Amino acid sequence: MKTIERALMWATVAGSTSKGLMYSVSALFFTTVVGLSPATVGAGLTVAGFVGVLTSYLGGRLSDRFGPRRVLLGVVVTQAGALVAYAMTRNAVMFVLVACVAVGAESMLRTARVTLVARAFTGAGRIAVRARLRVVDNVSIAAGSGAAAVALAVGTRPAYLTAVLSAAALTLSSTVALRRLPDVAVDVAEKSGAAPLRDRRYLSVVALHSVIAIQFVLLTVGMPLWVAGHTTAPHATVALLLVLNTLLVTFFQVRATRLVTDVPSAGRAVRNGTVLLLVACVAYAAAGYPGTWAAVGLLVVAVAAHTFGEIVSEAGGWELAFELADPANTGAYQGVSQAGMAIGRAFAPIVVASTAIGLGLPGWLLLGGVFVAAGTGTRLITQGSRTRANRSSSASSSGVSRI
C-alpha cells in the first residue's frame, strides 16, 4: 500500500506543479500570445468543463474495465500532448478542441486516481490517503504558481511558451511514478454490481455535494471579485488570503479526517462544514461595509471559516463517496461522484456571479443558506445509515437476497 501511495504522491507533485503553472499563465497566454478574446477563452473553457463532466464518468467505467493504472497512464500522456498543442494553437476552433481534450483528460485522471484509492485502501485509510494527496496537490499548485511568476514578470511570447511547454513536460514526467503502480485487479465476477445511476441514495448525496462544490469557485473567483469591486481592502489582500487558504488546508486537512469514522459521522461533518460556509458568507458580506483594516480583518475571518468549512465538508464527502458505493463497481460509482463535482464547478461561476457578487448582502445570505440546506439534506439522508458492505453483510446473514 505504501508503494501505491508513494507513487501517487510523486505523480501528484509533478501533475499539480504543472497545474499551478497553467493556472497562473493560461489566461494571459491565450489572450496575449494566441490572440483570443477573454470572451472566447471563457466560452471555450465552459464547453471544455461540460466535456469534463462526461469524461469524469467515462473514466470510472474505463477504470472498472481496464484498471485505473492503465487509465491514469493513458490520460496523462493525452493531457501532456494537449498542453503541447496549446503552444501551437492559432485560432478559436483549435483552442476549444484542445481545451476539451485537456480538461477532459484531467477530469478522467481525477476519477481514475480516486478509483485506485478506493480499490487499494480500506476504511479510514482511504480518506487519510486522499487527504494527504490533497495537501500535496495544494502545495504543488502553489509551487507551480510561484514558478509562473518568472514568465509573468518577463511577459514575452517565448517566456509564456516556455511555461506552457514546461507544464507539459512536468505532466508527462508523472508517468515515471505512475508506471510503478501495481495493477489493481478487477474481478470479472464483480460485474453484476449495482448501477450507480439507479442508486437513488448515492445520486442524492452526489447532487447535494455538487451544490456544496460551488464553494471552490467562490474562493478562487467570487472572493477576488468581491475584494476588488466591493471592499476597500487592497487588491494584494487576495493573494494573501489564497496563501492563508493553502496553509490551513496543508496543516488541517489530514487532521479533519479524524472527525469521520462512518457514514453518519460523515453526514454530520458535511452539515457542520456547510454551517462554517454560511459563517464565511456572512463575514464576506460584512467586509463590504467598514473601513480598510476592518475589511481586511473580516476577510481573514471569512477565508478561515471558508477553509475549515471546505476541509470538514470534503472529509465527509470523501467518506460518503467511498462507503456508499458498491465495491463491485468502484469506478462507475466514483465516476458519478466526480461528475457531480464537475457539474457543480461548471455552474458555480454563474451562481456566484448572480448571488453574492450581483446581489450583495442578500446574495451572500442566499448562497450561505443554500450551502446549509445541502449540508442538512446530506445529514438527513445519511443519519443512521450503514455502508453498503455492512448492509450486504447483514442481508446475507439473515438469508435476504441482495437487490
Image (spheres, grey):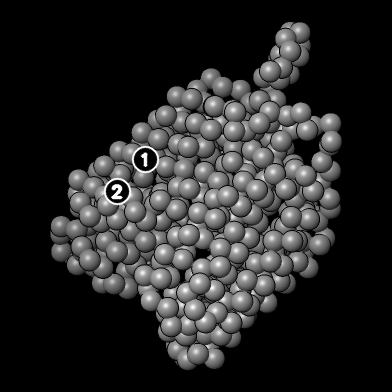
Q: Against 252, is 30 above or below?
A: below
Evaluate whether residue 342 shows in this view: yes
Q: Residue at x 47, y 85 (%)?
A: 33
- Please name the amino acid that badge 2 sits on: Cys
Q: Is residue 53 left or right of residue 368?
A: right
Q: Which mark is residue 313?
A: none
Closest to the observer: 340 or 41?
41
Q: Is residue 304 left or right of residue 362?
A: right
**How far from the left and from the top, in percent, is residue 120?**
76, 44
Q: Is residue 162 left or right of residue 297?
A: right
Q: Secondary structure at mark 1?
A: helix
Q: Against 29, is 133 above or below?
A: above
Evaluate whether residue 129 shows in this view: no
Q: Against 164, is 304 above or below?
A: above
**How far from the left and from the top, in percent, is residue 116?**
72, 48
Q: Which residue is mark 1?
A: 371
Q: Which residue is mark 2?
A: 281
Q: Residue at x 51, y 50 (%)?
A: 342
Cβ atoms at labels 1 and 2 below 8 Å apart: yes
